[in-house]
Image: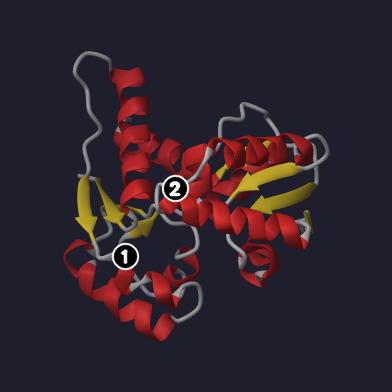
Amino acid sequence: MEQLIILGLGARSTLFYQEKLHELYFCKKGGYSTFPFILKQLDFNSINPYLPNNTSVIAPILQRELKDYNRAEVKLLVPNITIHKILDRIEFNLQIIHPYELLNKELENSELSNLVFFGTKFTNNDSYIASYIKDRSIEKLRDDEVLFLDDLRKNVYANTENNEDIIIYNKLIEKYSENYIVIIACTELSILNSSKNKNVIDLSILQCRESMKIIAQ
């Protein structure tokens, strides 16, 4: 029997995924339905200072904590986009619900070929992302926009974002989605995303929808 494990990291982002999964499951099943999963919570502070590239520190922690779930029938949902770069370097028997693999499939339905990524300050200069994107052009944000988004996602993590920043953020999405496919590639930014524009793809939502397909068949 297939089993879904959520790797709990940041408290707010992990809760966001759980609430979204329950929402999607209830919409499909009705009644008193809640999404069935197992939460494996880690101390995010043991990992976060070493993201995005310190595999030598992060990989042993992930291997140790996921050892009991490392089976082919287990599907792993990770509420942090950046850490998938590390996960790709580790051999697992479990199957990862991978945001960039899902993005590739989603892009097949889009006519636009130019992408822009909203994420951490590392996101816009990361060749790792480009390795997953086929036949698409990635536009870089302005430096001040990169810094704004990076500060905003930190504020969301700390529950200190303000209404003015949220308005600026959603206007930035609106601006870029006129001519680009906007990829929300940071879970904290997903929490604030209210856009229904077809040119906006939220990687967190792609992960949750894929989880639904697996569990709610």
Picture quadrant of residue 50:
bottom left
Helix or strand or loop: what does disc 1 sit on? helix
On the rendered structure, is 207 left or right of 216? right
Q: Position of residue 190 (x, y in %)?
A: 51, 42
Residue at coordinates 48% horizontally, 44% vertically from top-left?
204
Q: Position of residue 184 (x, y in %)?
A: 59, 46
Q: Position of residue 71 (x, y in %)?
A: 24, 61
Q: Residues within 10 Å of mark 1 (few under 14, many from 20)?
A: few
Q: Position of residue 16 (x, y in %)?
A: 37, 40
* Of residues 57 and 206, the one drawn nearer to the viewer in this rendering: 57
Q: Residues within 10 Å of mark 2 (few under 14, many from 20)?
A: few
Image marks 1 and 2: residues in contact by CB distance under 8 Å? no
Q: Which residue is mark 1?
A: 44
Q: Which residue is mark 2?
A: 160
Helix or strand or loop: what does disc 2 sit on? loop
* Of residues 206 and 166, the one drawn nearer to the viewer in this rendering: 166
Which colouring convention does the figure follow?
A: secondary structure
